[in-house]
Amino acid sequence: MAMCFLKPHYTHHLPSSTSILNSPFPKVSPTKSLFANGSSFSTRIPNHFRARPISSTPTKPFSFKAFSSQISASAPKPDEMPARVGFLGLGIMGSPMAQNLIKAGCNVTVWNRTESKCSPLISLGAKYKSSPKEVAASCDVTFAMLADPQSALDVACGEHGAAKGMSPGKGYVDVSTVDGATSKLIGTRIKATGALFLEAPVSGSKKPAEDGQLIFLTAGINLCDRSLFETVAPLLDIMGKSRFFLGDVGNGAAMKLVVNMIMGSMMASFSEGLLLSERVGLDPKVLVEVVSQGAISAPMFSMKGPSMVQSLYPTAFPLKHQQKDLRLALGLAESVSQPTPIAAAANELYKVAKSRGLSEEDFSAVIEALKVKLQSQSKE
Ligand SMILES: NC(=O)C1=CN([C@@H]2O[C@H](COP(=O)(O)OP(=O)(O)OC[C@H]3O[C@@H](n4cnc5c(N)ncnc54)[C@H](OP(=O)(O)O)[C@@H]3O)[C@@H](O)[C@H]2O)C=CC1
Ligand SMILES: O=CC(=O)O
């Protein structure tokens, strides 16, 4: 069962169970139908709203429930939100997310491995604690936005990890992009303390994080965790534009990995197109424009294309994280024997880019892995 809550007023009846796994020509694609009314996804509206269910389809695998969201002009009242909010991990994503919570009036306590990254948030009013354990002990709900499975595990379950500060009545929301097994492990450790757990990876990059426009892909271990989803909803709505509840832990991670697998392959293919267009004497800037006007247009191409043409890669989504996501997505595919040859090829390209020192650049720098030295080629 999947449920979607959106910031804008949105009423859309999604199709019930449809499998695309066995038929090359499915009559209805849930994904296509979900985004059929695409304009609702890009509408900028006030940050705070309340959501209520309006209709449902029978609960079964791969079915969806449609919800309508009502926009409220006023911010959530302080007594409707968890009083004390912790935030662990203040990188490209964590910093603006925590900042939005502070700006919305939340009582936020932060921690980051590199302590200096806490300073800008402290100057905005955040409190500081010197370990994840202390943050969790002093807060009602703690969010974690860490680099990868290992760091998410260390911060949640390490010696001074958040689990050590958790207890009944508290909640832990991991918004990092990790694999389902890591998420389940973290969830199990957190729940052993009597606290609740939600995995909630986000779709959307640096700018959506700054603008409070992220898409939360949440899942919980049981019905109690569903209640944590309700509890933190006002906080998710400060940081994001929509939130999906996807059922059991692992489903949020899987959804995020599938989305980023598509994204990584798209970027690799776009890179090939830019370079080929230039090779045959076309202006790649014009290619970006042509693509933007047609059926394969994507905000990602329009946003990143112009800087890629100039060999500039200002980091929004680090290339090392995109490669990590492809690696994890391939593991997911392997676990169900699903062929993903395009993603596997794209992954190789990101690995080459990493080996050329591009890990910290934006993932659009993958184009560099395709550039050939014209001089040495003309000698051949
Ligand atoms: N950037 C993007 O566009 C998006 C990223 N994501 C995902 O969100 C997560 C965070 O991404 P992003 O903010 O870009 O990444 P950054 O690399 O900017 O930040 C990573 C964070 O993890 C911390 N960290 C890394 N290793 C450890 C460790 N061993 N112990 C403790 N803390 C550690 C870093 O601390 P320190 O400051 O000390 O290095 C930092 O706070 C990733 O899983 C990424 O895949 C999801 C959607 C979009
Ligand atoms: O994970 C990256 C994103 O843009 O989403």
Image (cartoon, rainbow, N blue to C red):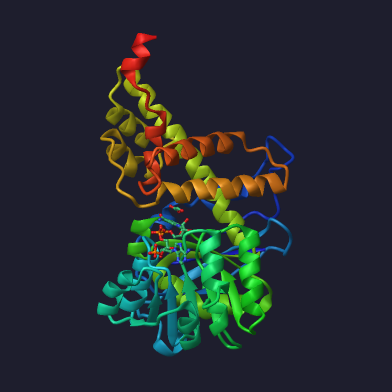
Is residue 53 visible from the viewing direction of this image? no
Q: Residue at x 40, y 44 (%)?
A: 363
Q: Residue at x 43, y 75 (%)?
A: 87
Q: Residue at x 36, y 80 (%)?
A: 75
View quadrant of ligand 1: bottom left
Residue 288, picture quadrant: top left
Q: In this rendering, is residue 297 above or below 112?
A: above
Point out the image quarter for the C terminus.
top left
Measuring from the top left, give residue 85's x and y in whole percent: 43, 81
Q: Residue at x 59, y 59 (%)?
A: 253
Residue 301, picture quadrant: top left
Measuring from the top left, give residue 153's x and y in whole percent: 56, 67
Q: In this rendering, is residue 312 above or below 219?
A: above
Point out the image quarter for the N terminus.
bottom right
Name the residue at the bottom extreme. 79
Name the residue at the top extreme. 380
Name the residue at the front extreme. 159
Q: How many marks?
A: 0
Measuring from the top left, give residue 66's x and y in whole percent: 58, 63
Q: In this rendering, is residue 93 above or below 261?
A: below
Relative depth, front residue between 145 and 55 = 145
Is residue 88 visible from the viewing direction of this image? yes
Measuring from the top left, give residue 340's x and y in whole percent: 63, 38
